[in-house]
Image (spheres, rainbow, N blue to C red):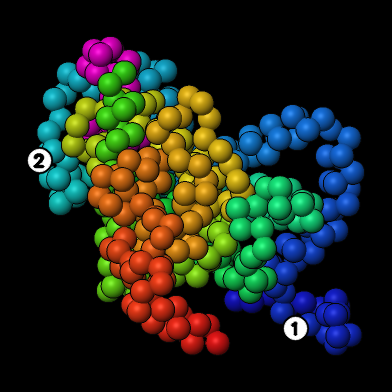
Amino acid sequence: MTAKRKTENDSTGTKSKYWDPLQEGVKWIEKYSESLENFFLRLPEFISTFIATLAIFTLGATLRGEWVVILVTALKQITGHTTSNKNVTTAEILQTFTTQNMKLSNFGFFFIMAHIVSYAIYFAIGGFLHWYFYINRRHKAQEWKIQPNKWLSPELERHEILVGIVSLFVTGSFSSFLACYIYNGNPSTVYFQFDEYGWLWFFLQFPCVFIYQDYTTYILHRMYHTPFLYKYFHKLHHKYKQPTAFSVTAIHPVEIMHVQLTACLPLFTVPVHWLPFYLVVMYNYYHGIIDHSGINFKSQWWQPWQPDAEFHDQHHEFFHCNFGFNMDLWDKLHGTARKKNLVYTEATFHGEAPRQGTAAANKLLTEERTKTD
C-alpha cells in the first residue's frame, strides 16, 4: 500500500498525492549537506579520509546480512562448540535439505534483524558516501573521479538504488537463512575452534578461499557476459556506465543469488573455519564497493594482487573486458584484459574486439552512435 501525503506541496505548488521515499532521502541529504560540509572542513584531511574508508568497510561488512552469520558462528566458538568429531559428509547435508529434518527455529528473528541492519546501513552510509564524494567534492571531480566528465543521470541513480533494494532483500534473506541454519546445529562443514583441523589448514584457508571465490566469480561474471545471459540478466547492471557505491548491489536478483550460492559452497563441502572464510568475504565486499565507487582508489603496497579501482570501472565503460575483481591475473591468463588499441562496444563479446582504424571497428562505432542518437 502506498502512503498518501496530506499537506506538503511539491515544487509546482500543487499537492503531491504520494510519498516518494527516494525523493525524501535526497531532500534530507540536501538539508544537512551544508552542516556536514562545515564539519568536515574543520577536520584534518587524514581524519576525514579515515572516516570515509571506515564507512566503506562498514557498508561492505553489513550490506548483504553476512554480519548475522558472523555473529552466530563467533558465538558458537566462544561457547566451545566443536564439529570435527562429527565427521559430517556432503551426503548428510544433502539429506537434510531433501527431508524434513532441517531445524529453523527463530528464523523470523534472523530474517527481520538481517534486513533492518542491512537497509539502515545501506541508506545511512551509502547516502553519506554519495554526499562525501558526489555532492561535496563534485567540483573537484578531476582530482578523484575515474570518469570526471561523465555522471549517472538522476534517473539512473534512483534506478540503481531501487534495483539494489530488491537484490539486498534476496541476499539478506539467504544470509538470514544461513545464520539460522548454523545456529540450529544443522549439518555443515563449518568448524568453530581454531585448531580442530590443525593450524596449517587454518592459515592455508585464507589464500584457498580467496582464490576459490575470486576465480569462480570471474568465471560466473564472464559467463553472464555471453549474449543470452547478458541480454536477460547482466545487462541490467551495465545500465550504470559510470558506477557509484550504490551500483555494487544493483544486479539482477537471479545473478546475485547465483554468485552468493557459489561463494558459499565451501561451507557445505570442505572443512572451513568461519573466521578465514568471512574475513575473505568482507574483503571482497569492501573492494566490491570501492571498485564500483567511480573513485580513483589505488591498491596498497601490501596488495600486489589487487588492481586499482579503475580496472573494474573500465569494465563498465567498455563492457566485455576486465572481468576479474580482486585479481587481474585471470584476465591476463585468459586474454580478456582490456587492450587500448581495440574498440570495445556492447556488441563485442568474450573479451574480443576489432583493432582501431579497421573497417570492423568503424562499423561498430557507427552502430554505437546510431543507437545513442
Amino acid type for the residue under numbered disc 2: Ala
Residue on which the image places disc 2 = 91
Mark 1 lies on a secondary structure that is loop
Majority secondary structure of magenta residues: loop
What is the distance, in whole Å, between disc 2 and disc 1 at their CAs?
A: 56 Å
Taking the magenta stretch, the answer to whether it contains residue 186 is: yes
Image coordinates for residue 155, horizontal then vertical, percent: 63, 74
Left/right placement of residue 17 relative to residue 163 reads: right
Which numbered marker is on residue 17?
1
Left/right placement of residue 50 relative to residue 85 reads: right
Amino acid type for the residue under numbered disc 1: Lys
Left/right placement of residue 109 relative to residue 126 reads: left
Callout 2: few (<14), some (14-19), or many (20+) C-alpha neighbours within 10 Å? few
**Residue at the limit of the structure toward the front, as seen here:** 357
In the image, is residue 353 above or below residue 200?
below
Callout 1: few (<14), some (14-19), or many (20+) C-alpha neighbours within 10 Å? some
Residue plotted at (29% across, 25% down): 205
Residue plotted at (46% across, 52% down): 312
Q: Nearer the viewer, residue 120 or 7?
A: 120
Taking the magenta stretch, the answer to whether it contains residue 17 is: no
Image coordinates for residue 126, horizontal then vertical, percent: 64, 51
Over which residues does the magenta segment extend?
182-202
Disc count in the image?
Answer: 2
